[in-house]
Amino acid sequence: MCIDCARRKIRRLKQANPLAEGAGWFLCIIDHDDHVHVRVNAQDAEDTSAEWVQIPAPFDVFQVALRETGIATRIHLHTPEPAAQRGCSEELIGSIPHVIFDAAAAASSVANEEVCSICYDAFSAGDEVALLPCAHRYHAACVAPWLAKATTCPACREEITESAVQSASASLPGALGTCCCTAKPVHRATVG
């Protein structure tokens, strides 16, 4: 979860919620430890937004990015009840193959209008991208928190299992030639 993702989301919020001179935001925030959901209420507006926006960054990182904007804010923070662990194990998440996108891989991704469906940002050169067994791709920092809470792909809901990850990892070199252009693998799962 990077501060750049938080900055991009805050810029989009500013565009969607323009403020009059001297006005600020009243933010409702739900803190999920690894990401936050934000609802913006402009202090000078009569109608308020009921739309929640997910920011793929922890609350403290979000606060730093928010302070950089200079927008006066009041925050109402909600903390959810802790949930029982029901996602993938850390070992399984750590065994999912990652690649670093180079310029060619990023250009191909942009040409195909492919984005990380968690943060909705395009893949850029230098991004670490996780390759799930179902062939869906996400920023590694975006999909790891999802998988810590769920055992399925965020897009197709295919179950992420150890055997599926091992099978996908074994075919990774061939997959790089077809889906990631010249992206370089970061690590591969060890096949037992």
Image: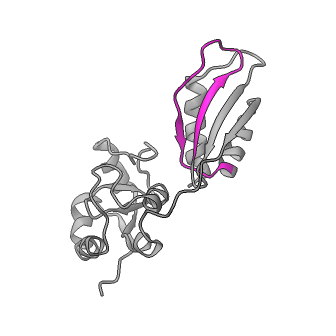
Highlighted range, magenta: 36-59
Which of 109 and 141 lies nearest the eye of the viewer?
141
Q: Residue at x 58, y 56 (%)?
A: 82
Identify whether 3 is placed above or below 84. above
Against 180, residue 65 (above or below) is above
Q: Is residue 132 magenta?
A: no
On the image, the x and y values in percent for residue 118 come to 43, 47
In the shown orientation, is residue 19 left or right of residue 88? Answer: right
Occupied quadrant, residue 45:
top right
Q: Is residue 133 shown above or below 63?
A: below
Query: Any magenta on residue 45?
Result: yes
Residue found at x 57% / y 50%: 35
Say whether residue 32 is left or right of residue 128: right
Image x and y of residue 16, in percent: 55, 24
Residue at (35, 78) in percent of width and height: 189
Q: Which quadrant holds residue 12? A: top right
Residue at the top extreme of this rendering? 46
In this orientation, which residue lies closer to the viewer: 61 or 179? Answer: 61
Picture coordinates of residue 128, whole percent (x, y): 45, 61
**Quarter of the rendering occupied by the N terminus:** bottom right
In the picture, the quarter occupied by the C terminus is bottom left
